Structure formats: C-alpha cells, structure tokens
C-alpha cells in the first residue's frame, strides 16, 4: 500500500465518523443535547409579573387551585375566598420568572408521558397546567416531573409548542388548595393567659388559672376530694392553645357548623377574651373562634397599669431630688429636678390615657375577629388536644381499691408432662 492510498483511506474514515455522529445526534429522541443556559423560559413574565390577576393550576382537565388578586391581597377561590399565602405565591411566581432552559428534550408526543408533560386535558394526565392571567398575553406552562435524580430541574413544555424542555429549578405546583392558604392564624402568648375553662358536650367543666403573670404554672380548680394533679405543670400545655396558632385547612362557617362541640373560654391579663368551639367534623379537627374584651378585667388592668406608671414616676422623681440635694442644690434646683422628670400620660390625663388603652384593646379584638369571622378552621391534632381536655386527664390515676397485689397467672402444664420421670435403673447383670 502506497502513501497515496493510505491518505485516501484515512480521509474516508474521518468522513464516516463525522457522518455517524451527525446521524446519532439528530436521531436522539430524549435530548438533543443543545444546552440553552442563557435562554429564559418565560421572558414575558419578568416584566409583567406585577400584572398577574389570576393563577390557575389544573390537572386532568380540571382546575384544582384558583388564586385571585383582590383589593387587599390574594385569595384561594376553592376555599371560599380565604386569604392566600402571599409569600408562597410570590416565591412560586419568581421561580417561574427566573427559570432558564437547561436543555431541550423530546418533541415526540408519544414520549411526553415519560417526562410528565403530556396533554393536561387528558383524563389520566399527570402533568399540571399553570396559567397566568392578567398580563397583556396570558401565559400557560405544562409542568411535568422534577428531574431530581438527574441533577435537578423540571421537565416542562410551553403550551402551543411540541418541544419539551428541562428548566432550571423546582417548578412543581401543588394541586391541593389547602397548601396555598395563609396558615398563620393568631398568637396570644401563653404567659398572657390568666384563666381557661373547657366545657365538654356533657356539661363537665375543667378550669385552670393563674393569679399573676409571674406565676409559672396554672392551678387546676375544683379538684375532687382525695385527688391531686398529675404534676405541678400538667395544665401548662392548655395555655398554648392560642400561641402561634396555625391551621391546616379552612371552610366557610356556614358550610361546616359546630356539632356537639367542646366550649373553651380564654381570659388574658389585659382583658382579652377568646371563645372557641371545637368538634370532630368527620375526622377534621374543626374550631371556630370569637374575640372580645372582658370589661372588668380590662378596667382592672388599666388601673394597675396606671398605678405602676405612677410608682415608676415617683421613684424617678425621688432619685432626681436626691441627686439635687447631693449637689447641695437649693429649693429651686430641687424643684427643677422634679419638673425635668417627664410625667407619663396616665398622670397628665388619667381619663384620656384610660380611653386610649381601651381603644387599643378594642383594635386588637377587631383585628382578631376580622380573621376569625365566618370561618371554620381545621387545626393540627396537637393544637386540638388543647381544646378537648377533661379534668380526669390532668389528675393522678385512682389507686386500686382492693389494695391486694394481682394474682400471678401462669399457664398450667399437662399433668403428665409436669413431673419428670427418671429412667429406670438397669439390672445388675447389665451393668
């Protein structure tokens, strides 16, 4: 073989390799491998995100979640217009706006289901259709499976396009309306609670109370004769019933009314009162709340607050006078030292101060009832346990009246098997 022939063979081999690579690349059904790391998935969304008025999440031809913008925020239509978790909603929209295309995937409709980007209108579809309305041109995105095992990213397909894509980030949209509601409901610190009473459907009542805010533990009232609390702190958990309260779900109160509920009354230092009714609604831990102010407690706390402010003022005045005397000041200097101590509002105008305190307390009640009114809430089991307690659960168990130790019961073996039989001795001649 001469040099010219060798060169011809080498060129032919290179051409064959290039052709094989080109065919392989263009026949790849799952990924053409053309990374588009700089391509924004939904370019329009970045500029028009603030114009969105409705977000719809659909699957199998049905709208599962509808989030709507209203005057003072967002609501979940499938939960009778209950407020949505705006922080979660905003995070989801920003993920969509920031998503970029990692690579193109299959354009073969027969293989869409492998990525979860099949037609979302199909009855058996696993894909989710996210529609954003309110912008100049509504946007729709078919969201498929999360590619967790492949290093992250979500398989998607823009509606109207055959090409599926792998987009950066987790773009999965939850189909449960309860996942989009505002979960935080109310917070009344356990240290503020003065009294709690729980009345069961049968009329039996459990009452616990503290004398002052400095008390560490709640006392159980009306403990039966001969009984005692399981521990000094056994009732303290009841005080957390309104502390950092979060809900699992919500329904319109008219659609889920109380049935044989426990009735709970909270009274806080400061006069705030919250009444709750709690019941088992077919496996749901249902609760309704109403806030009010206890006038007697509120007035007592206002008087105590003004007295405390006066005592603090008197102490500061005495310290200022003493300082002036130590400096060998005359009567004018002492008087000036007293005048320089600012009087609290409760001493300047006690009536006006009391009225301002009442208005502040009324505002707290108004805000709480704006949250509570018209709704039945579903709460976690650990929260519900604070609303259906009985006094028996907080007391030490009754002792065994007989006083005798229970007899030890053992299974009786078969009589023949109970007595071991020694083997018969061998005759002397066999030894």
Image (tube, rainbow, N blue to C red):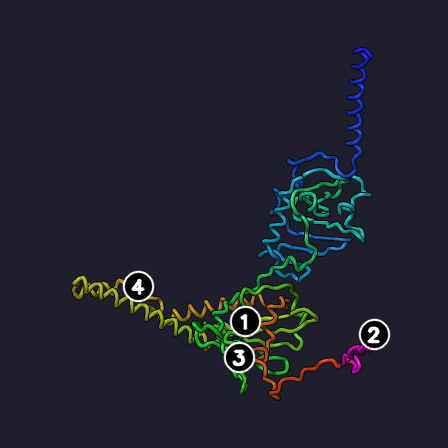
Query: Can residue 367 be seen by looking at this rendering?
Result: no
Nearer to the camera, 230 or 311: 230
Mark-to-mark CA distance, 4 and 1? 42 Å
Quarter of the rendering containing residue 16: top right
Magenta span includes 422: yes
| Quadrant placement of the C terminus | bottom right
| Quadrant placement of the N terminus | top right
The circle drawn on residue 237 is 1
Front label number (4 vs 2): 2
- Secondary structure beneath dot 3 equals loop
Quarter of the rendering containing residue 75: bottom right
Mark-to-mark CA distance, 4 and 2? 120 Å
- Secondary structure beneath dot 4 equals loop
Nearer to the camera, 60 or 215: 215
Reading the image, the residue beneath label 3 is: 229
Front label number (2 vs 3): 2
Could you tell me if the residues under marks 2 and 3 are in contact, i.e. CB atoms within 8 Å? no
Mark 1 or mark 2: name the one nearer the start of the chain: 1
The circle drawn on residue 430 is 2
Residues drawn in magenta:
414-431
Mark 2 or mark 3: name the one nearer the start of the chain: 3
Mark-to-mark CA distance, 2 and 3? 77 Å
Could you tell me if the residues under marks 4 and 1 are in contact, i.e. CB atoms within 8 Å? no
Within 10 Å of disc 2 (Cα), the crowding (few <14, some 14-19, many 20+) is few
Mark 4 or mark 2: name the one nearer the start of the chain: 4
Reading the image, the residue beneath label 4 is: 342
């Amino acid at each position: 073989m001469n040099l010219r022939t060798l060169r011809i063979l080498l060129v032919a081999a290179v051409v064959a390799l290039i052709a094989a690579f080109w065919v392989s690349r263009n026949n790849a059904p799952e990924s053409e491998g053309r990374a588009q790391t700089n391509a924004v998935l939904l370019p329009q969304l970045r500029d028009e995100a603030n114009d969105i008025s409705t977000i719809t999440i659909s699957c199998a031809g049905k709208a599962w979640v509808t989030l709507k913008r209203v005057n003072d925020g967002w609501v979940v239509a499938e939960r009778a217009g209950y407020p949505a978790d705006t922080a979660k909603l905003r995070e989801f929209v920003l993920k969509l706006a920031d998503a970029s295309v990692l690579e193109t995937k299959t354009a073969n409709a027969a293989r869409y289901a492998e990525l979860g980007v099949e037609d979302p209108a199909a009855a058996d579809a696993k894909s989710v259709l996210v529609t954003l309305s309110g912008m100049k041109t509504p946007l729709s995105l078919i969201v498929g499976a999360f590619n967790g095992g492949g290093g992250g990213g979500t398989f998607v397909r823009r509606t109207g396009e055959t090409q599926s894509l792998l987009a950066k980030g987790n773009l999965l949209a939850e189909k449960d309306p309860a996942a989009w509601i505002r979960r935080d409901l109310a917070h009344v610190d356990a240290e503020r609670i003065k009294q709690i009473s729980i009345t069961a459907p049968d009329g039996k009542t459990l009452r616990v109370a503290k004398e002052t805010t400095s008390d560490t533990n709640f006392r159980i009232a009306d403990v039966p004769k001969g009984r005692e609390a399981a521990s000094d702190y056994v009732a303290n958990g009841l005080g957390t019933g309104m502390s950092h309260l979060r809900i699992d779900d919500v329904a319109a109160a008219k659609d889920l009314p109380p049935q044989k509920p426990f009735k709970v009354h909270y009274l806080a230092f400061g006069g705030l009162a919250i009444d709750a009714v709690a019941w088992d609604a077919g496996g749901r831990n249902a609760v309704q709340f109403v806030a009010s102010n206890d006038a007697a407690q509120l007035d007592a706390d206002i008087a105590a607050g003004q007295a405390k402010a006066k005592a603090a003022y008197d102490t500061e005045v005495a310290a200022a006078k003493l300082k002036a005397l130590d400096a060998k000041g005359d009567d004018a200097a002492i008087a000036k030292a007293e005048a320089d101590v600012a009087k609290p509002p409760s001493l300047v105008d006690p009536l006006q101060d009391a009225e301002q305190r009442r208005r502040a307390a009324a505002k707290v009640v108004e805000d709480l009832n704006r949250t509570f009114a018209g709704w039945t809430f579903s709460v976690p089991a650990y929260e519900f346990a604070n609303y259906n307690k009985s006094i028996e659960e907080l007391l030490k168990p009754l002792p065994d009246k007989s006083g005798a130790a229970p007899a030890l019961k053992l299974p009786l073996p078969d009589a023949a098997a109970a007595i071991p039989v020694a083997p018969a001795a061998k005759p002397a001649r066999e030894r």
